[in-house]
Amino acid sequence: MKQILMAALACYCAAAMAGDDTLYWFKNETACGPAKVTIRSHCLKTYREGAARQRNNGCPAQEVLIAQPGKKPVKQDLLKFEPLDDDFHMAESMQCLPVSGRHYLVFNLSTGGSCDTCAVSGVMSLDGRWRNYGERWMATSKAEQQAIERAAKGLRDLPEYEILNVVPDDERGRK
């Protein structure tokens, strides 16, 4: 919770300096295997009319909602492992990785910079549990780790879903 508050404070300060301190909820929807995946981001409106690539940044909160037929939807914080400073990673794209009859979400997160640590990836199973974040594996058997790593070698051949944060999420409203 402290992480989210610090990140929100950093974004509010940046927005205040820019003259707009309002954050909006945006949604990004796609599918992965049997699941409907919705990424919700609480962002500043930073895109400009006429820009070649529309994207909203400055998102101090991002979450994923995974809905599968016959199962209770699960929600997970995409910024759960981010530091308290203002150089936190934000999910910019996602890929659906099929592994031995299961599916995983591979998130590409970035600070927007070009340093060695400015980009990380994270792997989440469709039950909403993080399997990997950056270089760290979490509660994942060695066999599952190896299967994910083998399958991940083919990520370049899989479609990548950009998380642009430009579709308003009317269900979340304005905060």
Image (cartoon, rainbow, N blue to C red):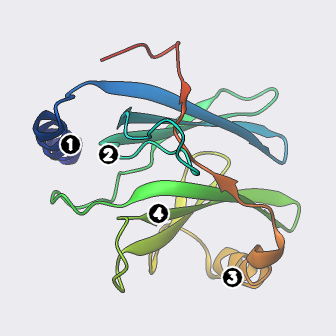
Residue 2 at least partly seen: yes
When asked about the image quadrant of residue 158, the answer is: bottom right
Residue 11 falls left or right of residue 94: left
Q: Residue 24, position in %: x, y?
A: 38, 25
How many discs appear? 4
Image quarter in which the N terminus is found: top left
Q: Residue at x 39, y 46 (%)?
A: 57
Marks 4/1 in contact by CB < 8 Å: the verdict is no
The residue singled out by tag 2 in the image is 58
Residue type at mark 3? Answer: Glu
Assess disc 1: are there few (<14), some (14-19) or many (≥20) residues with their C-alpha within 10 Å of its C-alpha.
Answer: many
Pick whichever of labels 2 and 4 is earlier in the sequence. 2
Pick whichever of labels 4 and 1 is earlier in the sequence. 1
How far is the residue under mark 4 from the one under mark 3? 18 Å
Image quarter in which the C terminus is found: top left
When asked about the image quadrant of residue 4, the answer is: top left
Assess disc 2: are there few (<14), some (14-19) or many (≥20) residues with their C-alpha within 10 Å of its C-alpha.
Answer: many
The residue singled out by tag 4 in the image is 109
Residue type at mark 2? Answer: Gly
Q: Residue 54, position in %: x, y?
A: 54, 44
The residue singled out by tag 1 in the image is 11
Disc 2 secondary structure class: loop
